[in-house]
Image (cartoon, rainbow, N blue to C red):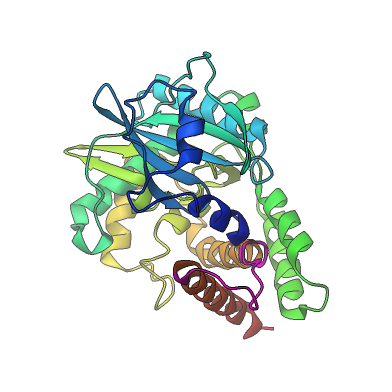
Amino acid sequence: MMKLSLMHRVVDTVDENWQSPLAEQILARWEHDPGTAQYYRASANFIFIFKNAGKLHFLRFNERTERAKKLLEAELELLHALDERSLRVSRPVKSLHGREVEEVQTEWGTFYAVVFEALSGEHPDAEELRPEQYAAWGKELGKLHQAMKALPEELSAQRPSWRDHLAFVSEMIPPDDQAAREKLGQLLHWASTLPTTKENFGLIHYDFELDNLRFAGEEIGILDFDDCSRYWYVADLAYALRDLFEAGGFDRSHPLFLAFLSGYRSATQIDPNYEQQIQQFYELHNLVMYAKLLRAVDLSDSQDHPEWLANLNKKLVAYRARCHAKFASNS
C-alpha cells in the first residue's frame, strides 16, 4: 500500500475523463493507441488501462521510493518462468526501447513502469462462486505452488521473505506500542520454529484472492505477482481465503474451504500441520497490514483534502484501528 500523499499527487493529475498527462508521459515509452489510457485504480501501484492495436493492456507504475527496481525485474523473471511452465499469467510487454521496466522522470516524480497484456476472463465475486469453482481456485493455487517448487533457487532468492516483512513491522511500530511489540515477538518466535523444506516453503503469490484472478471457462489466469514472497505455502492458502473467515475465524469444516482444499491437494501436497498454522498466519498478515497502514496514512488532519481522499484516509485509519484491536485484545 502506497503513501496517501503520493496517491494524492498522482490521482490529482486525472481529469474528468479519467485521463492523466502523467500516464501519457509514461506510456509514451510503449506502443499504444493514442488517447485510450484511462485511470483504473491505485493501491500498491497506479494502474491505467489502455489499448494497443485495439487490444486491452495495463500500465502499472509507482514512484521509485515505493518499490525497488530490482524487485520489479525479479517479478518479471518469475512471470517468464511460470509462463514457460504453462501457467496462465499476465505477460509483460517490452517498451519501444526493448526494456520491460522503464524509469521515467517527470515533474511529479520519478517512476518505475511496466506494461502487461490483459488476461481474458471474468472477475467473479466470492458470493457467486459454487463449490466446484472453489475447487478450481484451490487447484490453480496448487498448480502454482507445484511450479514454484521447480524454479531455480536464484529466482526465489531475489524476492523478500517473511523475515523481511517482520523487519519492516519492527521498523514501523512506534516504541510505545507495547501490544504490537508483543505480538511481533510472539510471531517472530513462532515462525522461527517452523520447519522449512522444499515441499512446505518457497515462493508464494501472497495475494491469491479473487481480485487477482480471471476465470475463463476451465482456465484461471493469475495477476499481480508484485507481492510474491518467500513463505510457507500454507500462508498462501490462508491469505487467499481470508475473506471467507473474516467474521468467524478459521473453520476447518467449512464446505467451501474443504472444496478449495480438495482442489489444492489434487495439484500438490499440503503441510500436514496446516490446521495449526493457518490462524497464526492470519495474525502475521494482520500485523504486517497494520505496519503498512502506519506508513501509508501520512496525511495531516489539518490539511484540506479532496472528498475522496478524506474519505479514504478515514477508512484506512479505521482499518488500522481494527488491525490493532485484533492483537491488543490478546496482550
Q: Is residue 304 magenta?
A: yes
Q: Is residue 174 left or right of residue 304?
A: right
Residue 225 seen anywhere in this rendered image of the structure: no
Residues 170 and 259: in front is: 170
Q: Position of residue 89 (x, y in %)?
A: 38, 32
| Picture quarter with the N terminus | bottom right
Residue under the point 34% across and 34% down: 50
> Image quarter for residue 308?
bottom left
Residue under the point 33% across and 48% down: 138
| The magenta segment | 293-307
Q: Is residue 249 left or right of residue 282?
A: left
| Picture quarter with the C terminus | bottom right
Residue situated furthest right in the rendering: 175
Residue under the point 41% across and 55% down: 240
Residue 173 seen anywhere in this rendered image of the structure: yes
Q: Is residue 58 magenta?
A: no
Q: Position of residue 15 (x, y in %)?
A: 40, 51
Q: Position of residue 280 (x, y in %)?
A: 57, 66
Give above or below for 163 relative to 140: below
> Image quarter for residue 112?
top right
So how many labels did they put on this image?
Answer: 0
Magenta segment's dominant SS is loop
Q: Position of residue 208 (x, y in %)?
A: 42, 49
Give above or below for 12 relative to 56: below
Residues 73 and 159: in front is: 73
Residues 165 and 199: in front is: 165
